Image (cartoon, grey):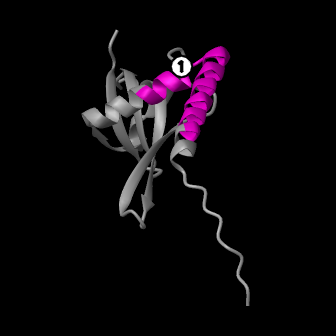
Amino acid sequence: MMYDIKQFKLTSGEEIICEVVEWSTDEYSDIITRRCFTLHTLYDPDKDAKFYSFRSYMALQEGQKSFISINNNHILSEANPSKTLIKHYKDAVERSELDDIEIEDTIENLVNRLKDLQDSADDTVVNFRPKPVIH
């Protein structure tokens, strides 16, 4: 089943992206969500660029079976996230739901890729040893 992926700005100032499982009704003012992440914006003045990161909205509440209830009164605004944001969100969800063995495999693959990059960089690095300075 496909759920709505929505981006919310909360009264606390936090910005979250999540899957909405059930919308609020007249009888129940909460929205039931899962796979909630807060969006954090970082600005690098040297590169004049913004970077975004995802963090779990609530500790140990990850996965498709962990539901979070958000009170409708604490939502300032709602938006449909851009395609780029949805792509990065899905990557974050996938990574957050890895088991211990998959995490170890991912780390091992990343370490091997770094070693390969280092080995290829060593082939192109010129060894420079300056002459001693005599005063």
Q: Position of residue 102 (x, y in %)?
A: 60, 17
On the question of residue 135 being in view, the answer is: yes
Q: Which residues are magenta?
A: 91-119
- Name which quarter of the figure residue 105 lies in: top right
The residue at the point 33 percent across, 36 percent down is 85
Look at the image and tell me in which quarter the N terminus lies: top left
Q: Position of residue 101 (x, y in %)?
A: 66, 15
Is 110 one of the magenta-colored residues?
yes
Q: Nearer the viewer, residue 128 or 4?
A: 128
- Disc 1 secondary structure class: loop
Q: Is residue 103 above or below residue 127?
A: above
Q: Is residue 90 above or below residue 64?
A: below
Left or right of 22? Residue 133 is right
Look at the image and tell me in which quarter the C terminus lies: bottom right
Q: Which residue is mark 1?
A: 63
The residue at the point 65 percent across, 65 percent down is 129
Left or right of 42? Residue 100 is right
Q: Position of residue 116 (x, y in %)?
A: 56, 33
Q: Is residue 21 above or below residue 74?
A: above
